[in-house]
Amino acid sequence: KSGFAALIGRPNVGKSTLLNELLGQKIAIMSDKPQTTRNRIQGVYTEERGQVVFIDTPGIHKPKHRLGDFMTKVAQTTLKEVDVVLFLVDAKEGRGRGDDFIMDKLKSIATPVFLVVNKIDEVHPDELLLIIDDYRKQLEFTEIIPISALHGNNVKTLVDQVFRYL
Ligand code: GDP
Ligand code: MG
């Protein structure tokens, strides 16, 4: 099995940390280049079951300049073509405007979207449930997976679920 996963989320939610955990230090450093209009391959996760190509879609974030609208359209096309979208959020910070901007773009695509709730090491389980509920009210998610990218908690489960949708 092989396929594509788009990893999206506002700055500081832990995208690079998750890629480091999945792919190793070397590749994730390469991925932190300045934003371009094109979609970037961030790394290829390979194991016995197959491969997952992780891609970044810079335009899905709130536009910062004149190219913003064009980039958002490119990003939305990409999100329609991947096998799964991993929408990473920060359990510690909770839902913010950056998340709402992204969820608005996700409303019009049919691709499975996982809500990946990161930094669970920083919140009480009761608080985590409230945060998940808050997101679920905004958008329907195919899977909801709480993780700690920093400590590696539940990252294997995330990978297992991704393979189910390739
Ligand atoms: P990005 O901007 O989405 O790529 O986010 P980064 O991967 O650069 O992470 C931003 C900050 O969050 C860094 O200081 C990370 O160490 C921290 N971080 C990432 N994942 C976790 C996690 O699971 N738990 C905790 N406590 N911190 C995390
Ligand atoms: Mg990063």
Image: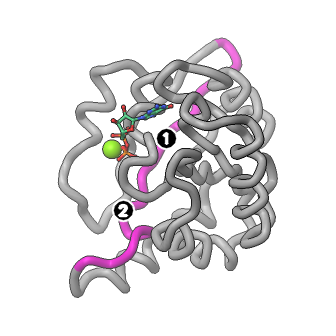
Q: Nearer the viewer, residue 63 or 166?
A: 63
Mark 2 close to ligand 2, CB under 8 Å: no
Query: Which secondary structure lies at badge 1?
Result: strand
| Residue 122 versus residue 35 in the image, above or below | above
- Residue under the point 32% across and 62% down: 38
Residue 62 is drawn in which quadrant? bottom left
Q: How is the image coloured?
A: one colour
Mark 1 close to ligand 2, CB under 8 Å: no
Q: Is residue 58 magenta?
A: yes
* Label 1 vs label 2, nearer the camera: 2
Mark 2 neighbour density, 10 Å: few (under 14) some (14–19) many (20 or more): many
Q: Residue furthest top?
A: 48
Q: Which residues are magenta?
A: 48-64
Percent coordinates x, y for residue 103 in the rendering: 61, 71
Percent coordinates x, y for residue 148 in the rendering: 57, 29
Query: Which secondary structure lies at badge 2?
Result: helix
| Residue 132 versus residue 36 in the image, above or below | above
| Residue 79 versus residue 34 in the image, above or below | below
- Residue under the point 57% across and 39% down: 118
Q: Which residue is mark 1?
A: 54
- Residue under the point 63% across and 44% down: 117
- Residue under the point 38% across and 19% down: 24
Q: Residue furthest left?
A: 34
Quick one: quadrant of the N terminus? top right
Q: Which residue is mark 2?
A: 58
Q: Is residue 74 magenta?
A: no
Residue 20 is drawn in which quadrant? top left
Q: Nearer the viewer, residue 95 or 111?
A: 95
